[in-house]
Image: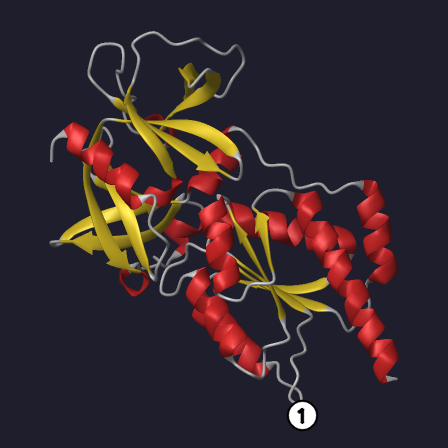
Amino acid sequence: MQQDQLFAEIDKRTQLALSNEMEMLTFYLTDRQLYGLNVFKIIEIVETPKEIAKIPLSHPTIKGEINFRGHPINLIDLSEYLGLDPIDFRKKLSYTLICEYSGTTQGFLVAQPNILITKGWEEIIKPSGNIYESSCLTAITYHEGVPIQLLDVEKVLNDIVGIDIQISQELVEKGRQVVRKSHHILAVDDSKAACLLIKAVLNQMGIEHTVVDEAPKALQLLEASLTPDGTSRYTMVFTDIEMPVMDGFTFTRKVKSDPRFKSLYVAINSSLSNKSNQDKARQMGADDFIPKFTPNNMAKIVIEQMEKANQRLLADS
């Protein structure tokens, strides 16, 4: 596929409503293996400029800043981050994937874009074993027998630019005032960085919580949480969108279409925070949409739902 055709196809596909499939751009790094990235995170693909503005005291994998539509953005060498040979963008033709994550824009330096492919989430395999626990690999899939590695870009960004996991002291104090022993929050996310933030926020507020890395596991826990009167022990649920086996939209639809969980508060917590995804979340029955890595926003939603839960307990007593 010619580069201009590839760019045009990405522009076309990013306008589509999300389905239960993942549309990904495959690309090469310096090891010539295939990697994949969700098309809906990609704003644009550009040829990497030869000259960039160096950022003093920045992470070594941040090669500098490039100008994107009048704004400076980080240029991050994914190859170097993975311990591979850096991309020699000054001497060789290379490309930058301009991506949006939770309202921030980043540039990811790659050796060569490849092709667009569509995969069902059930075809996205989560690797197991100790070697993957500390890696930035979040999943693997195959195309015509060739493995494609999906990176946990949220972990990449956490390692390179950092993620704020602290909530304001005011919210900490207010949270501890409304939290009751009966409150229990369920969260599902396959990103290690996102799980770290969720746990940190809820720990600061003193709320009991369970975090799992796959939607089917969360469904099993919801089933097991039903009390004799038919209600769930969980006060609310957070879910990511991009997850192996079952995506967050499908998970949300399954939960909200089940009469037993219809009143359970479900908030989608995703870095795919554009308007089309927020609209899709509402269509699936989600009660709220929270951009990832905004700890104060998460804390406010939690407090609001804990207060409502406390009011229901008073009304029932």
Is residue 38 visible in this depiction of the protein?
no
Q: Residue sitting at 74 percent across and 51 percent down?
A: 300
Q: Mark 1 points at which residue?
A: 228
Marks counted in the figure total 1
Q: Looking at this view, name the residue that lies furthest to the bottom.
A: 228
Mark 1 closeness class: few <14, some 14–19, many ≥20 residues within 10 Å: few
* Residue 74 quadrant: top left
Is residue 157 visible in this depiction of the protein?
yes
Residue 90 is situated, as x and y percent measured from the top left of the image, at 27, 10
Residue 110 is situated, as x and y percent measured from the top left of the image, at 28, 28
Position of residue 248 relative to residue 204, above or below, is below
Amino acid type shown at disc 1 = Pro
Quadrant showing the C terminus: bottom right
Q: Residue sitting at 22 percent across and 39 percent down?
A: 9
Position of residue 89 relative to residue 182, above or below, is above
Quadrant showing the N terminus: top left
In the picture, measured across the screen, residue 228 lies left or right of residue 289, that is right
Residue 167 is situated, as x and y percent measured from the top left of the image, at 74, 43
